[in-house]
Image (cartoon, rainbow, N blue to C red):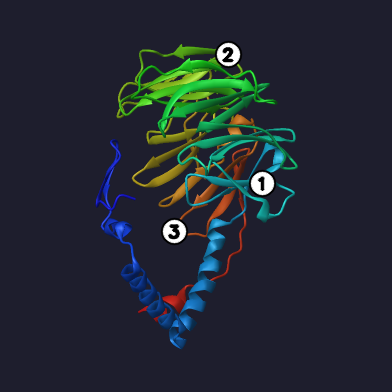
Amino acid sequence: MTGKEVRDLGYLTWKDPYAWMESMRGKRWEALLHTEKAHYNELLAQPHVHRLNVQMEKEIKAAHQYLSLEPFKIAGGTIDIFFVPSSRFMWKWSWLPRSAEKPAYDIDVQGNIVWYVTSNEDKKYKNQLMCEDSTGKRIWSKSAVSSQLAIIGDHCYFIKVVDYFRTVELCVCDAQTGKEERVIYREPNKERDLLLCKTANKTLYLQSQDPESSHLYRVNDLQVIPLYKNSTFQMPLGESMFSANCVYTRNKVDEPWIPHGKPIENWTLPAEEIQWMNLESGHVLTIHEGAQTIWYCAERRKPAILFKIKAGLIDPNIWTKWENSLIQSFFIKSPFDIPHIIHIINNKIVRKPIHIKFSFNVVFRQLR
């Protein structure tokens, strides 16, 4: 609260034209606020404004269904994942009511134990890693972590942060107790960020990135092993049944991806820009001129189109490949259709119907 119009954090600068109000104090200022609030309440009390307000409230509640559609199911159906319009999502145990939802950036589950990363409200920009059982009892927690985590066997992997956003260390601890914490990789370059890549068959990779390049590492137990050092960008898919690290690499953004590892070395990819891939199911999500497409790719076969939208957004269930699920789900949001979920089973599209009934006509007509 500086009162200055220009805000400068060193790495980020912006203007706030209303910043001058932050320094306003005293009786005259409080009286002005009281007067403005009285005018606002007087306006709301007018009959035609009140009617419009009630109608708009009903329409907004109806439209909220768009944000509360059917969830993705993970962990064998025991966890419900609800997308919300932010970088986070909401989750709950499937048998609990919607009021039990909790916000998270990432989540992992084993049996009746859940690990998730959420915001620490006591320290801005610092997240908390939580471990709870199915009754909501907290087992352990850690602060000042990034938005990612991964559980493999008895190990919990997470990334520590300093100075608000800078990711510096890949750490591991005992997943059940949170103890025996140790650092298995430290990033020496302050300009690079650390990211975890959770891929097929519970294969974990670490990427060290800056805007121009990426370094890839395979995380194997307590070892961090560099991979494909001579490439600039990498897209890991996981360890295949042939014990190969299946990774696509390229040196320039406009170059085609080069496959490494069996079976993807025999795949033919679509010519469009790839956004997401599932090694086990062979599903590939691409984008071209705003249109998104879901393909099926396999050894020595041409890519086959399974589903496409001309505009909108396709969100994959990213936990499917991590959990080796046989069913791949996608959340479809298009201006030409009601948002819905599709499941792909044996390359057949199964649409889960969602029935939503509302209209914005009343509000639009009165606002003209």
Numbered disc 1: secondary structure:
strand
Numbered disc 2: secondary structure:
loop
Q: Say what amino acid the circle numbered 3 marks.
A: Pro
Q: Which residue is mark 1?
A: 92
Q: CA distance from mark 1 to mark 3?
A: 29 Å
Which tag, 1 or 2, sits closer to the chain's start?
1
Q: Which residue is mark 3?
A: 335
Q: CA distance from mark 1 to mark 2?
A: 31 Å
Residue 297 seen from this side: yes
Question: Horizontally, is 133 left or right of 15 in the view?
Answer: right
Q: CA distance from mark 2 to mark 3?
A: 47 Å
Residue 319 numbered tag? none
Q: Say what amino acid the circle numbered 1 marks.
A: Lys
Whole-percent x, y for residue 322 in the image: 60, 30
Tell me: residue 122, above or below residue 280.
below
Q: Which residue is mark 2?
A: 222
Viewer-side residue, 20 vs 215: 20
**The image quarter in which residue 181 lies:** top right
Which tag, 1 or 3, sits closer to the chain's start?
1
What residue is at 46 percent from the left and 84 percent from the top? 45
